[in-house]
Image: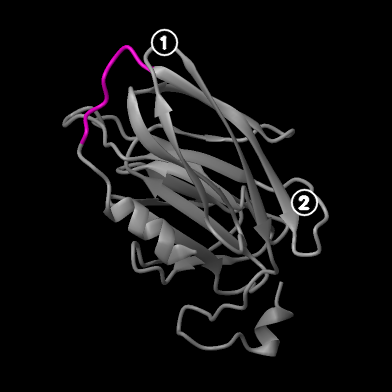
């Protein structure tokens, strides 16, 4: 899954965004491995095939992934190249946020309740984020080359405004997806393009700590 998504980022054309533009709308359904509908699955829809015009991404946005109840909230976040992510600790114990992903390796160290640490993401890619103290904590950050991305609504529907005319690839992404889901769309100025996508997800894969080792049993009970 990671390789396919990264390949999509790497093969982006340098087409500049043009105005006026069109809109892409539709619905994404997510099912579990047993075929039942996934409840509350965080899902992101984004368009690849173009980048923003040079100089248009001058303003840096700061998104947030909170740490609450030994969970990352949200556990899936889409941002644009150059944006930052803040990681506030809302739990009454230490967390140590880190990533070993090739696109952006980092280690924020241990920090306590009420403290916030930030990280900037200058290149596109898929970033898997974990806590070195609590192995059950996992999140994914999608760093995208343009601002045409959105989170689906609770019913799975979505709308992407301001998409330049042309033929692009639309991706739907949810954590633990068993395969990538995408489709080609042709966008026309001033018109709506409709697309429906279906995702399937499996169990959370096991991961190692920031030292590349398995979590010690004593660590998993530390709160």
Most foreground residue, 203 or 164: 164
Residue 174 drawn at (x, y percent): 60, 52
Which residue corresponds to the image point at 54% horizontal and 81% vertical from the top-left? 208
| Side of 47 where 93 appears, left or right | right
Q: Does the magenta portion include 16?
A: yes
Callout 1 secondary element: loop
Q: Is residue 124 left or right of residue 150?
A: left
Give percent across and percent down for residue 7.
34, 59
Most foreground residue, 207 or 223: 207
Q: Which residue position holds label 1?
A: 190
Residue 76 seen anywhere in this rendered image of the structure: yes
Quote the CA–CA distance across marks 1 and 2: 34 Å
Image quarter of residue 130: bottom right
Residue receiving disc 2: 38
Q: Magenta region's main secondary structure? A: loop
Magenta range: 15-21
Looking at the rendered structure, which numbered label has been put on residue 130? none
When the figure is inspected, residue 120 is found, relative to residue 137, above or below; the finding is above
Image point (52%, 56%), residue name: 180
145 up-or-down from 206: above or below: above
């Amino acid at each position: 899954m990671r390789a396919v998504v990264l390949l999509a980022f790497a093969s982006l054309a340098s087409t500049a965004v043009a105005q006026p533009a069109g809109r892409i709308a539709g619905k994404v359904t997510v099912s579990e491995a047993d075929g039942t509908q996934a409840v509350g699955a965080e899902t992101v829809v984004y368009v690849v095939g173009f980048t923003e015009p040079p100089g248009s991404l001058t303003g840096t946005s700061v998104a947030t992934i909170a740490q609450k109840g030994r969970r990352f909230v949200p556990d899936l976040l889409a941002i644009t190249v150059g944006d930052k992510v803040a990681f506030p600790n809302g739990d009454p114990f230490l967390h140590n946020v880190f990533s070993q992903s090739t696109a952006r390796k980092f280690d924020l160290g241990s920090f306590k309740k009420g403290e916030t640490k930030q990280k900037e993401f200058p290149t596109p890619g898929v970033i898997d984020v974990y806590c070195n103290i609590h192995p059950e904590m996992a999140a994914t950050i999608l760093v995208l080359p343009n601002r045409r991305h959105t989170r689906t609504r609770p019913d799975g529907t979505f709308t992407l405004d301001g998409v330049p005319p042309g033929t692009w690839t639309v991706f739907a992404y949810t954590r633990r997806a068993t395969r990538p889901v995408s489709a080609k769309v042709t966008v026309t100025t001033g018109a709506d393009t409709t697309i429906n996508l279906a995702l399937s997800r499996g169990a959370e894969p096991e991961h190692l700590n920031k030292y590349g080792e398995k979590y010690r049993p004593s660590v998993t009970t530390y709160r």
